Amino acid sequence: MFSLTLFVSNLGFLTQAKAFSYLSIPIVIGIIFSPDGIIPILPSTREDLSWALKVALTWTTFLAGTQLSKKTPYWGHVMKLLPIFLGYSLFYLISLILISYFAQNILNLEFFSNGNYSPQALALALLLSSALFSSQENPFLLSMVFVSLFFVFNSPEQNFQFADLVLPLGIGLIMGAVCRLIISPESVLDTPSRLTLVGLAILGTGWTVGLGSLEVLFGLSLGWALSFIHKYGICKDPNLKASDIPIRFIVALFAGLFIKLSITLFIIGLSLALFRLLIKYLLLNTGLRTAEDLEVLTSLLPISKLALPILLSLHLSPYSNHLTSFTLGSFCIGFITNDIITLLIEIYKTNTLTKKEALI
Amino acid sequence: MRGPSQDINIRIVIESLAAIALILLCIWLIENFFGRDIQENSLLSLGLLVLSGLSAGRLCQLIGLPSLTGYLGAGLFLGPSTLSIVNDNQVEKLQLVNSLALALIALQAGCEFTKEMLQKNFKSLFYGTFSHILIIGIGMTILFALMKPWVGFLEGFDNIEVITIAALFAAVAVSKSPAAVVAILGESSVRNKLSEHALGIVVILDVVVLILFSIVLAITKATLNPDAPFSMNALSHLFSEIFASITAGTFFGLFIIFYLRFIDRERLLFVVAISYGLTALCSYLHYDTLLVFVVAGFIVTNFSDQAEKMTHTIESLSSIVMIVFFATAGASLHLEELTKIWQLVIVMFLARAILTWLSEFTTHKAANSPIELKKYGFTPFISQAGLSIGLSVIIYDRLPDVGPKIATLAISVVTLNEVFGPILFKWGLNQSVKIEKVLT
């Protein structure tokens, strides 16, 4: 299963497609091999590998963290994203209605109190909708995921606290400072630098996991600390970035392994993906947001690469319960649907362009 | 397999160690000031093993010892025998990395086996294989049997039984450590007659020892338990598994050639994928993993021009894997067992070292090998590691009464060999290079 995913990532087929993320393929492989899938693996096998997965989650967010300084929002960018946030408000409402209508029975959650939606229900919708509506150009929406955690997990048994957010970020900064002690920012990505980075990433992951917090936060913080505070040249090294795609494939495979498919997940995931596309289409069609075809295909339509690692990390954390399982499952179905539709759109656009060129 | 950069100075080592101390201090501070307990987990141990292994490896390089000794030392220091930061349960969970390490080691070893190398060293490899089995095997058997009055657990056994138990212990003593040999050669980048001889012998002996061990185990079981008749079934099963392993190795070697020749994308991932995939297959079908990978490497080297790509990829991957492999090996060593029977362990350790020297001396005398092999040919073969421990564990499982005691003794001797073997080999390798320089 592991080898199959690596081979798939190696073959590099469909390289012509810009909108397709390829991550849908390992997710589907994961679903096939999941304990409830067609060729099931033992849950214990999956659990035995969870420590390696946690490192993969850290590494993928670490790489994203090294790119964070490039994405610092500026005024023009905020103005550009404003219609997207408006569209998101509509998407949030749709998500809330869909979840409360279809998933009320399976979630064992008190959706209403005093005739209104309960904070937990509102937060759950926020969690799923922000992850699904995020895009390559707007990963900032994912900060909503962390805000929602304070309300989704506020029971005496599972209580997400401020320290759960701050400690992993702090550990990332500490590890960044430690890295500065061992290797200088001018170093090249040679064997000792690579080993030090890997060692720090593993140790920090272990520390964060030991504290019962989210390793993705540590990864983001470490990446940001190294590239932004200490200005490490190695963060720009193409060899470091080369590890990104395979690690993402592994993360997606494991996400698939944790999914327990159901009709409700299908309905919610599929409909939310369709609504997402519809809202983005409306934004573009009404002129609220203008973008070239290429920008639409590469930035606007694909879901943020960080969303899947964050949701999977949440499902692997001590906060794992039926709500995280539901969120991960619905998100993955939505992700696959979005991938397929954007691929079809791209094929359609390419064919139209080819025909036009032929006519000219 | 190239280790961490050679450009090491004392400042780097001190800074690395200070960094680890700083991390441990921060962990302590957060635990105490934020009141957040850190739950035990294998990632924390793995991270500490990697960072401290890296620092200890650098320290060893600085004082002229192999990095491998530093990795082992770091594991030993953090392991259950000393600080207990890393426990047996956590080491067990890191087996995923170990299987990758073994696959890389075996592939690398197989890639070194060129037809020219085999032709050139045929005599020394041929004599070497026999002399190791005969001299160390018979020598250790006799010594162990003669030590009966001082070996408490042999009390009550008749002479025949003692001899079979001694032969079983001797079979473990004949085994070597391909991992240590490949790691030291990778670190030093030396390729000479001694390196070729070392690689050849450790790989050939790996297969021969398995056969020898199975025969001796079957005889010992039949001798100790007259109700269980001697059966050749296990042996025929072993031969069929070896044959199947060679076939599988050939097939996968051809597959690797095909991939590197026609696809050749993301080699690093390809090597990881094939290592895990094939290891899982070998474990499922009960093939000898080491043999499968050695044969695959041999096929790639001798039947294509893709070997350079392959070795280059393995080298870039192996540094982290080697640290984890040897650091976890260090962490799994139990010094407390060794201290209980230290006199016996030292006698066995010295006897094995002397017999190894004797067998190599005889080999090179018979093969008329060059002077550097005659003098330092024994140095690669003191090391013992995974294979020897694996055989000891089989003894532990298969012989319910006396098995655990033999295994404890064998593992204690392996511990000493694991610690001192790599140091001796690195020294021997350096000396052989000096002699070659003088001669040329």
Image (tube, coloured by chain):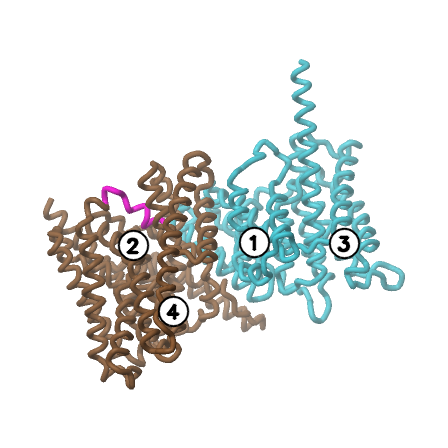
Chain colours: A cyan, B brown
Q: Nearer the viewer, residue B278 or B108?
A: B278
Residues marked 1 and 2, same chain? no
Q: Which residue is mark 2?
A: B203
Cα–Cα span, label 3 and label 2: 60 Å
Same chain under badges 4 and 2? The reply is yes
How far separated are the C-alphas under marks 4 and 2? Answer: 20 Å
Residue B116, placed above or below residue B138:
above
**Dot 4 and dot 1 within a common chain:** no
Q: Amino acid at mark 1?
A: Leu
Under mark 4, the amino acid is Ile
Q: Chain of mark 3?
A: A
Q: Is residue B392 magenta?
A: no
Side (left or right) of B439 relative to A149: left
Assign a secondary structure to mark 3.
Answer: helix
Q: Which residues are magenta?
A: B107-117
In this view, the mark in front (4 or 1): 4
Identify the mark at residue A125; answer none if there is no mark: 3
Closer to us: A350 or A189: A350
Residue A57 disc label: 1
